[in-house]
Image (cartoon, helix red, strand yellow):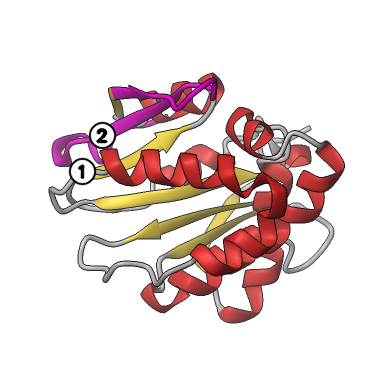
Amino acid sequence: MRTNTDITTIRRAGFDDLAQTASVLAAAFQDDPVFTWCVPDATRRAAVLPTFFRVVANAIAVHDDIHVAAVTSRPVSGAIDGAAMWLPPEAAPVGDLEAPFAELFGDDAGRAFEIVGLLEEHHPMTPHHYLWFLGVAPAAQGQGIGSALLRQDRPGPAYLEATSKDNRRLYERHGFEVVDELRVGDSPTIWAMWRPAEAATLGG
């Protein structure tokens, strides 16, 4: 249980943080509806997601916009409780990840690429900050860590895709509004969400 003396600290992730960041995000998204649809077998999903998030982290680390969070009262020094992976408006397109993802997802690659194609098709062209992933370790959820990561000063509009109703509600509290509902085949709903520049300081 979190106490009044607990403080969430946020910092930019360094290269040495990427493996732990990937592990935290993998745990956070283990039961996510969209990842569950992409990789139905839970054991296989638990094996795939840490590598998936490490590939993503390595691909965007050059932009120095991955942030990690920790509750200072944790007994383990250097532990990471949550992470947010952003791409800034000026970011060059992420390199081709098709080959490593095809190998990683194996027989599940078809569904994974359907989701990737859907998101790419509906991604806005207006310059914006893109929140690719935000997640909190299951044991640390409900302590305001996600909100702390979203309160980072980030001027200008922002965009994300919420993959669960709980995440959607979190983002709505921080000024994001649903602009589209996306699905492919029998996939779960994905909510495309936009936060205008003037709403960037909202949240609680």
**Residue that label 1 marks:** 124
Q: Earlier in the sequence, mark 2 or mark 1?
A: 1
Q: Residues within 10 Å of mark 2 (few under 14, many from 20)?
A: many
Contact between labelled residues 1 and 2, with CB atoms less than 8 Å apart: yes
**Residue that label 2 marks:** 194
Q: Residues within 10 Å of mark 1 (few under 14, many from 20)?
A: few
Question: How far across and how far down the image is residue 154, in percent?
Answer: 28, 53
Distance, label 2 to label 1, CA atoms, is 9 Å
Residue 188, labelled with which disc?
none
Magenta residues (range): 180-204
User: How many marks can you see?
Assistant: 2
Please check the rendered image and state whether residue 202 is part of the magenta-colored stretch, yes or no.
Answer: yes
| Left or right: residue 172 compared with residue 2 | left
Question: How far across and how far down the image is residue 117, in percent?
Answer: 39, 45
Instruction: Note whether residue 80 is visible.
Output: no
| Left or right: residue 78 compared with residue 190 | right
**Kind of residue indicated by mark 1:** Pro
Instruction: Classify residue 197 by image quadrant.
Output: top left
